[in-house]
Image (cartoon, helix red, strand yellow):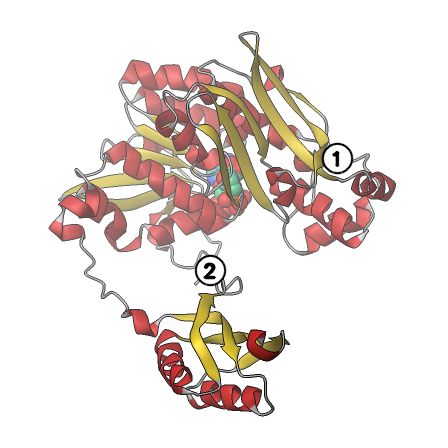
Amino acid sequence: VTAVRIGLLGCGTVGQAVVRALSDGGAPITRASGHRVEIGPILVRDPDRRRPGVDPSLLTTDVGRILDDPEVAIVVEVMGGIDPALGHLRTALGRGKAVVTANKQLLARHGAELLEQAERSGTELRFEASVCAAIPVIKVLRESLLVAEIEALTGIVNGTTNFVLSEMGRGGLSYADALARAQSLGYAEADPTEDVSGADAAAKLAILASIAFHTRVRLDDVTFEGIERIDRDDMTQAQELGYAVKLLAVARLVDGAVALRVHPALVPQDHRLAAIGGADNAVLVQSRGAGQIMLVGPGAGGTETASAVVADVLSVLGTHRGSFLHNALADAGRPVQPPGESRTPFYVRMHVADRPGVLATVAGVFAEEGLSIESVVQRGQGAGARLVLVLHEGLESCMTAALERLRELPEVSGEPVVLRVLDVAGEGR
Ligand SMILES: NC(=O)c1ccc[n+]([C@@H]2O[C@H](COP(=O)([O-])OP(=O)(O)OC[C@H]3O[C@@H](n4cnc5c(N)ncnc54)[C@H](OP(=O)(O)O)[C@@H]3O)[C@@H](O)[C@H]2O)c1
C-alpha cells in the first residue's frame, strides 16, 4: 500500500464532504486501488472558520503549500470561480500533478486549454463532479458508450430550475413564489441568476457535448434561454395540452454538425423526462449502438458531489485489478441476510368459500402471525368468491407461516397467490 497525498483547493460544502469521505486514509480508495490517501494541505480564505471533521492544522491561505509540494500528487479543486482557480490549475497541471475539479464554469470556458496542458505534462484532468453531481454521466459518455455512436443527448441538468418548474406545475405557484420556496429550502442560491438564466445548464451542456461528440464545444457555442418569463398561465396551458414544462439542455448531431441549445420546452407528459421532478437531474442519451439510456439522480449537494470527486480520484489512481472481486484486502465480509428476514408489504389473493365469517377467520390468521391488513376486497360470488388483501410491511417468514395455516383452512381453496408490493417509502434503505 503506497501513500498518495491530495491537496485541496477549497473546503466549503463539497470540500468538507470530500474530507469526510476520505478520512481514515480513504479506506474505500485503499480497497479499490491499493493506495492510501493522505489529505492536505487545504487552501481556504478564512482558516478560522469552523469546519466539522476537518483538521484545522491542514488549512492554509498559501496555495504554494500545495502547488510547490512535490509530495502532493493530486489536486482537488472545489473552490469554484475562474480566478484564481484557473491559475492554480494551470500551475498544478504544469508541474505534473493530476487535477480533479467540480468547477463547470471553469471547464466550459477553459477546459480545452487545461486538457492540453494535462496532456503535455503527461497527467490527467478529471471533472465528473462538474456535471450532475453524483450521476456518473461523464464516465458513461467517455468510457461505457465509447463505441455506441451517440446521436443526441437531452438533459435536465439544473436542479434549481427543475425544482421551480415542478413546484409551478404541481402547486400552481407563480414563478416568484416557486423561486422563493426553492430559496427557503436551499435549492436556489440567494442570487439565482446563473441557474434561472440557463447559464449553468449551458456550461454543463458544453462539457457533456464535448465528450459525447468528441468535439471541443465551448460555452460561447451554446445558445441559452432561461425560465424567468414563464408564468402560471403557461403552466396551466401546457398541462391542458398534455405537456410538462422543463428546462432542457439538448445536443444532437445534425448532418455531422453539433447542434446545441438550452431552453424551456414542452415535454409530453408520458415522456420519460416529464417524470423527473423536484431538484433531480437526468440525462437521456440516444445512440445508434445502445439505444436510449437515461441516467437520473441528484444533481447537487455536498456528499453527492463529493461522491463524484472521490470516484475521479480513484480513476486517477487506477483500480487494483477487479477491486474487491480480485482482492482479499477489499472483501468487507458482510453477512447475507436470510431470505425469511426480508420485509415488504404484500398483496394476497385467495379463493374462499362464500359464507359469513370467512374474512374474520383469514384476518385472524394474519394477525396471529404478526401481519396487519391495510385493505381487503371481496370479489365474486359462490364458487368464484375470492379475497384480495393488501398487508402492511411484514416479515417474509411471517407470511410463510401464515400461508401454511391458510392452506389448512377448509374455507380456503387452492393455493393463495402472494405478490410483494414495491416498498416505495423504503426505497432508500
Ligand atoms: N455545492 C454543490 O452542490 C455543487 C455541486 C456541483 C458542483 N459544485 C461546484 O463545486 C465547487 C465548490 O462548491 P461549494 O458549494 O463547495 O462552494 P463553497 O461552499 O462556497 O466553498 C468554496 C470554498 O473555496 C474556498 N475559496 C473560494 N475562493 C477562494 C480563494 N480565492 N482563495 C482561497 N480559498 C477560496 C472557500 O474558502 P472559505 O471557506 O475560507 O470561504 C471555501 O472553502 C464549485 O465550483 C461549484 O460549482 C458544487
Which tag is nearer the camera, tag 1 or tag 2?
A: 2
Quarter-wise, where is residue 376 in the image?
bottom right
Closer to us: 132 or 50: 132
Closer to us: 57 or 389: 389
Q: Residue at x 34, y 77 (%)?
A: 397
Q: Residue furthest right?
A: 233
Q: Which residue is mark 1?
A: 227
When the figure is inspected, residue 375 is found, relative to residue 249, above or below; the finding is below
Q: Residue at x 72, y 43 (%)?
A: 165
Residue 135 x %, y % = 46, 40
Dot 2 amino acid type: Gly
Residue 129 x %, y % = 45, 37
Dot 1 amino acid type: Ile
Which part of the image, by quadrant, shows the N terminus? Answer: top left
Which SS class for mark 1? loop
How many circles with numbers are drawn on the protein?
Answer: 2
**Pointer 1 with pointer 2, Cβ within 8 A:** no
Whether residue 105 can be seen here: yes
Number of other residues with Cα within 10 Å of mark 1, as a class: few under 14, some 14 to 19, many 20 or more? many
Residue 60 x %, y % = 39, 43
- Disc ID at residue 428: 2
